[in-house]
Image (tube, helix red, strand yellow):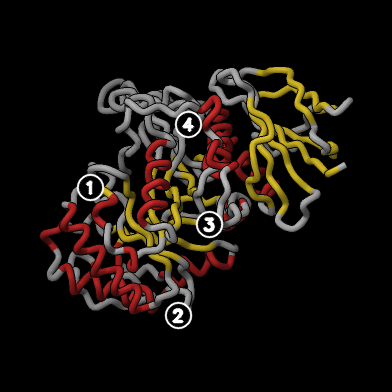
Amino acid sequence: MRFSTATKHCGILCAFSLLAFAQADEPTSKPKPLFRDFMGVNGHTVSFKPDLYSPVCRLVRDYHPMEWDTGPDSDYKLDFPFARNRVNWDQVYGSWQRAGFTTDACIMFETISPDKWKDVRHDSNRYGKLFAQNFGPSSNLALVESIEIGNEPGKYSDDAYRELFESMAKGIREGDPKLQIATCNVNVGKSGDYHKSIDCVSGLESLYDVLNVHTYAMLEQWPTWKRSYPEDPDLPAFTHDVDELIRWRDENAADKLVWITEFGWDSSTKSPAAEGDFAKWQGNSDLEQAQWLVRSFFLFASRDIDRAYIYFFNDEDSPQLHGSSGLTRSFKPKPSYYAVSHLFQTLGDYRYSKVVHQSTDAGGVRVCEFSHESNPNDVVWVAWLPSGSQRQSEVQIPSRGWKLRSAELMPIDMSNDNAVNVSQENGQLRMQVSESPTYCFMRRE
């Protein structure tokens, strides 16, 4: 569908062994989001099955093709809720809403070449205004909560993107001021093939609410496209670009949100073709995909991020880059589906609190605390080994005045066989920890 963006900063490595969660314990002016308001998945228009994915999260991001609405004519007389190809957005987004989802629409204008617009300022402004009037929170339909102006418009020049962004955003603000506006995928620094520089929207702070970033755990690019586990200290960019954007936001636009709208791993049961661009492609196992998605949410939750969306909802088992990133395979749940659903249902009413335990050795056990939204005497400790070799380790962790109520292991199937042996004695928790997170339900003694 498109290539990865996380490639750039090989010289700056994240010292995860001690620093990965450093931001989490710093004072913050606002509470961390509850996990039910934090976890999202990328869907795609008529292919998304809301009832199937409702156990996974309540946030869905749609790749909304602008050309479906306008065809090749940017000045086409829009007929919302119908697209020009007669897809009924009321039916599409309405079915998502009825299943409990909140929709973020990523307007994919990238298929319209910059030189094919009849009048880019006028037409993008009109499109934004009418979209907001018909689908925004203040409209009769009220189907879309937020809108992104582009996904990865690297083929647009910086000047062309800024012109389109400013015009469309002004139209959206006029159409419905309650509709949140997000940038495309942006990074601090120069623009690239799959992202724009944050400089493209500098000075336009009144026209956006959210800074949007994509990140992938890429160890290598072509020809292997090799990805690693999220805490890997050799990863050049998985959290670096995110942290740089947060720092830029804090210094230049402190009232804006930061969303990660794409992250994920490919897991296919097939071998790649013998020839072609993906002949040497290396995917990950289904178990690794499940473990690394869940652990990524913990990494992201420790930062000043308000949402994180998984790429992707479904795949057809294609052994190539972004070809097998789904939570389902041909709409049948993969292990990641069960692991992410369990995370959402277990921590939906909880928010990230702090690091409880951090081993000083690289790859040592980590334990993070998640606090209940209304009951301060109810917390969940999540423990795991942050590596990619499927290790296990017997550990003891001080219980710090908390009493163990129960514990369970991250599931990877529907058997509900996620029992794990955790005991408490003499102020210590003793457990066998693996790279699949263990959830310990604690109550204040």
Query: Alpha-carbon distance for marks 2 and 4?
Result: 40 Å
Q: Is residue 46 visible?
A: no
Residue in the foreground of this view, choosing between 147 and 199 = 199
The residue carrying pointer 3 sits among few (fewer than 14), some (14 to 19) or many (20 or more) residues within 10 Å by Cα, namely many
The residue carrying pointer 2 sits among few (fewer than 14), some (14 to 19) or many (20 or more) residues within 10 Å by Cα, namely some
Which amino acid type is shown beneath numbered disc 2? Answer: Ser
Tell which circle, 2 or 3, labels the residue nearer the N-terminal end. Answer: 3
Residue shown at 42%/67% (left/top)? 180
Query: Alpha-carbon distance for marks 3 and 4?
Result: 23 Å
Whether tag 2 and tag 1 are in contact, CB under 8 A, the answer is no
Quarter of the image where the N terminus is located: top left
Query: Of helix, strand and loop, which one carries label 2?
Result: loop
Residue shown at 31%/39% (left/top)? 3
Q: Is residue 173 above or below residue 161?
A: below
Query: Alpha-carbon distance for marks 1 and 3?
Result: 26 Å
Which amino acid type is shown beneath numbered disc 3? Answer: Leu
Tell which circle, 1 or 4, labels the residue nearer the N-terminal end. Answer: 1
The quadrant in which residue 162 appears is bottom left
Residue shown at 26%/42% (left/top)? 189
* Residue 28 on image: x %, y %: 56, 51
* Residue 381 on image: x %, y %: 72, 38
